[in-house]
Image (cartoon, rainbow, N blue to C red):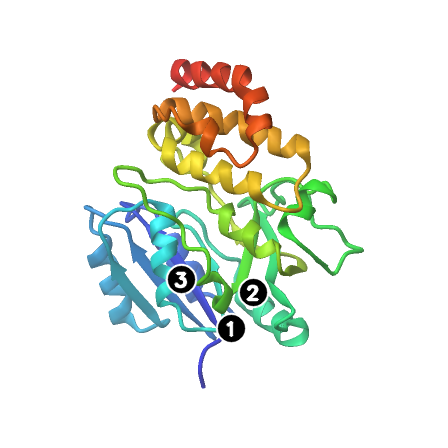
Amino acid sequence: MAKILTVFTPAYNRAYCLHECYESLVRQTCQDFVWMVIDDGSTDNTRELVAGWIAEKKIEIQYFWQENQGMHGAHNSAYELIETELNVCIDSDDSMPEDAVEKIISFWRKHGSEKVSGIVGLDVYKNGEVIGTKLPEAVETSTLFDLYSKHGVTGDKKLVYRTELTKYYPYPVFENEKYVGLAYKYYKLDEDFELLILNEPLCIVEYLPDGSSLNMLRQYRKNPRGFAFYRVELMKLPFVSTSYKFRQAIHYVSSSILMRNRSFLKEAPSKLLTLLAMPLGMMLYVYVLVKS
């Protein structure tokens, strides 16, 4: 019988912590999943480590190596390779509560359909504390964007998507850059689908010092084309407010200056907002240079 869920993990030189993710998957009360490791060009012993786990045959593991492309490039590869109905990303420094897979699959079997894009659940710290806020109790489905903008949700949340849909909207890979905001794909899917809300912990998160979340200013400076693309796409979304577009325009201006793109105003989807955002965008550019 074909498995329903792929848990995929992008890994770049994370052999020192990847065992926690693996051990949490071995402990799952439901084994109806595949663990896919996308090795994004690691130079440590990640390959050998995963090979040892494959040999143990405790869970089904698929391993793929690629030249380093960054998190979004690893996501692209995973979405091309995954064959199960559902998928969820568990980062290399994260793990899953032992009943998380069981909760995902039982909830999907009861409520899932082609009318929704997937499930949104909770991320928690190791002590069980929910990151940010819980999801709204009175709402059964919502877009990811509306959860944050209309329902007041804060903090990272765990997304389980239908694989058929995650094959759409691949992230662009820019030469010599390693970052594009992952939410680009999620907000594009929001245009057509809502997510089922599951107010249960699906992922245990640890923000490590070498993780992208804690190095965002440095990422911002090193990946201006990726950030500019992301801001342009957010400005194009049909369901966002003018004030939201203006905030994206500020970041677009800053990233465009960083990449020395003199045509950014002509290329902007909202030219008037971008023009108005230029003074603040220039200030942000200076801030990034000073702080990163």
Residue ranking furthest to the front: 266
State if disc 1 and disc 2 touch (CB < 8 Å): yes
Residue at 77% x, 56% y is 139
SS for callout 3: helix
**Front residue of this view, candidates 190 and 26:** 190
Counting residues from the start of the chain, the first of labels 3 and 2 encountered is: 3
| Mark number, residue 30 | 1
Query: How many residues crowd around disc 3 within 10 Å: few (fewer than 14), some, or many (20 or more)?
Result: some
Counting residues from the start of the chain, the first of labels 3 and 1 encountered is: 1
The image quarter containing residue 262 is: top left
Which residue lies under the disc numbered 2? 99
* Distance Cα–Cα, label 3 vs label 2: 24 Å
Q: Is residue 144 left or right of residue 164?
A: right
Residue 85: x %, y % from top left? 49, 73
Q: Look at discs 3 and 2 and give the one toward the viewer.
A: 3
Which residue lies under the disc numbered 3? 79
